Amino acid sequence: MEIIVQKFGGTSVKDTAARKQALQHVQYAVDQGDKVIVVVSAIGRKGAPYATDSLLGLVGADRSRLTNRELDMLVSVGETISTAVFTELAREQGLNVTAMTGHDAGIVTDDDYQNAKILRVDPKPIQTAFEDADVVVVTGFQGATTSGHITTIGRGGSDTSAAILGAALKAKRVDIFTDVNGMMTADPRLVTHAHFIKTISYEELANMAHEGAKVIHPRAVEIAEQAHVPMRIRSTYQAPDELGTLVTDRSTTHIEHYRTVTGIAHQTDLTQFTVPTTKLSSSEIFQLMAEHGLSVDFINITQNQVVFNLVDGDATVAKGLLTAAGVNCQAISHCAKVSVVGAGITGTPGVTARIVTALSKQHIDILQSTDSYTTIWVLVKEADLKPAMNALHDEFLGVTPTAN
């Protein structure tokens, strides 16, 4: 018995037409002789009645008086409704199917409600269900504590659910279905010459996801990599034999060794802080941020100052904390981080020089930069984001698709 996991996000289950399209992929896999674990998100996105944000809005969202445990009781309902609705339609179309909550499916978490960590997955419930059923539909985004309290596992949790079930059940593949055809070299809404990526390594995809590419949550990629479970990023709205982007170990793909850069990712709505270390030390500054739940990013530390970024929503809080501590700082709002990602960057000379030259030709100021083995980041003004993305994409990935 071979198992495939298929995860369908909110837009893939938003209405009857979308669910019927998703079920074509399920039926196709069953016809190929596979058992299928279907993981579903809540129906639709923000504004839809059962989307997570809509459910939170019923109790005042951030102003709610509910405890995190009680909030998990509420928001988990979205995936439960979606699972029941999807199962009803699947059964109507003749599939041999059963439905499970995350708890039913053996997903055990800690009790960090709203952002629970998966401790283990018992594969037996789904294995037993497959003795009679061809398809098991499972609620994404949720599990339960050892004492049986329902939990949710944070934003992007349905991707994580799919990956962890694929690992536990030794699936031959995890398919993540979205409303795009697969991974693109950049956001096509910003980059004129963005094109489809046929194959990508776990590491490259995780880096792009961390840096703003929204097709999959990075935790899911990391889980799949640890378990060596291949993934595909696919479109719900393409034919079932269109398999999208393959995600796997770099050594087992046909990724050409000469592909230095795989893609360009971005994040917006950032504020850059430059804080002198005359009043507070660098460690005291970061401790102050941590004590108030502010997650800093893109950090540069020198002898006299620290430079870091916060999302714009946290910037006001940080300014208040630093002012109260008697620290004068410079804050530049409306910034964007552009990330050049590629496993081929490692050991390749001149990549940074090409980035600086490409941006300089467009008269784009680099506010900050740093690098790792596979990613080089630059901070620019948000007004320069689109020309920066296009300049870097054209420099490294060209106008027409290259070998993938």
Image: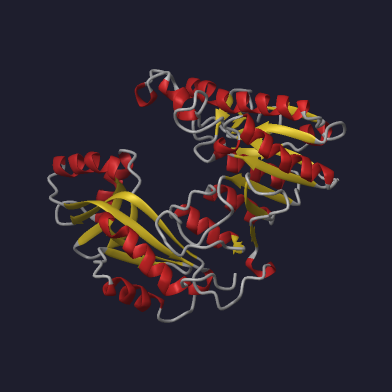
Q: Position of residue 9 (x, y in %)?
A: 58, 39
Quarter of the figure with residue 312: top left
Foreground residue among 96 and 324: 96
Q: Residue at x 56, y 78 (%)?
A: 258
The number of numbered badges drawn on the structure is: 0
User: In the displayed structure, does residue 125 sit left or right of residue 230?
Assistant: right
Q: Position of residue 124 (x, y in %)?
A: 79, 35
User: In the displayed structure, does residue 271 sit left or right of residue 343?
Assistant: left
> Which coloring applies here?
secondary structure
Quarter of the figure with residue 182: bottom right
Quarter of the figure with residue 248: bottom right
Residue placed furthest toward the bottom: 349
Where the C terminus falls, by quadrant?
bottom right
Where the N terminus falls, by quadrant?
top right
Foreground residue among 388 and 314: 388
Q: Residue at x 30, y 38 (%)?
A: 292
Q: Residue at x 33, y 64 (%)?
A: 388
Q: Position of residue 58 (x, y in %)?
A: 43, 19
User: In the displayed structure, does residue 190 sit left or right of residue 250?
Assistant: left
